[in-house]
Image (spheres, grey):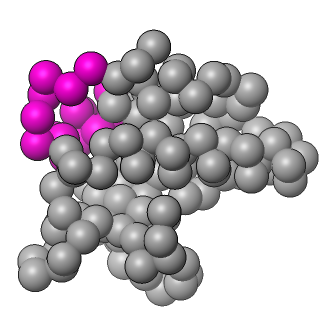
Amino acid sequence: MRKTFRIKKPAEFQIVFDHHQSVANKYFVLYRLKKENQKHFRLGLSVGKKIGKAHDRVHVKRRIRQAFLEFKPLLDQETDILVIARPAVAHKSQAFISQQLEHVLKLAKLLKDDNHDSTT
């Protein structure tokens, strides 16, 4: 995922947090902020130390980014999205993470096509 698709600055994270539009399941908390005239969605990730050591957290981030690449054509492009991974997601498969992210994206009504079937 290109860096233009990422939220990196703490101030940008704070703007999305302060907007208070969130949904959650057992594995992820998702915050969203609609931004008019934005060419593509932007993704911010937060993976806490409760998930494990640094290499475990990086592994989870990579799997989340990969799942978002799969959903990219179906996502609302004028949105900033923050995903907070909960400790229960540690050591889960790519297919499982994609399935759970699809669930939370549907709860947030960010997927354009509800007929998308993730690979399991």
Farthest residue, direction right:
53
The residue shown at (10%, 81%) is 37
The residue shown at (77%, 39%) is 51
Magenta segment, prevailing SS (helix, strand or loop): loop
| Place of residue 48 in the rendered image (x, y in percent of width and height, measured from the top left) | 72, 51
Q: Is residue 112 magenta?
A: yes
Residue 104 occupies which quadrant of the picture? top left
In the displayed structure, 12 sits above or below 16; it is below
Q: Quadrant of the C terminus?
A: top left
Residue 118 occupies which quadrant of the picture? top left
**Is residue 91 at all visible to an observer of this figure?**
yes
The residue shown at (64%, 29%) is 89
Range covered by the magenta-colored residues: 103-117
The one nearer the camera, 69 or 32, is 69
In the displayed structure, 49 sits above or below 17; it is above
**Is residue 17 at all visible to an observer of this figure?**
no
| Place of residue 59 in the rendered image (x, y in percent of width and height, measured from the top left) | 73, 44
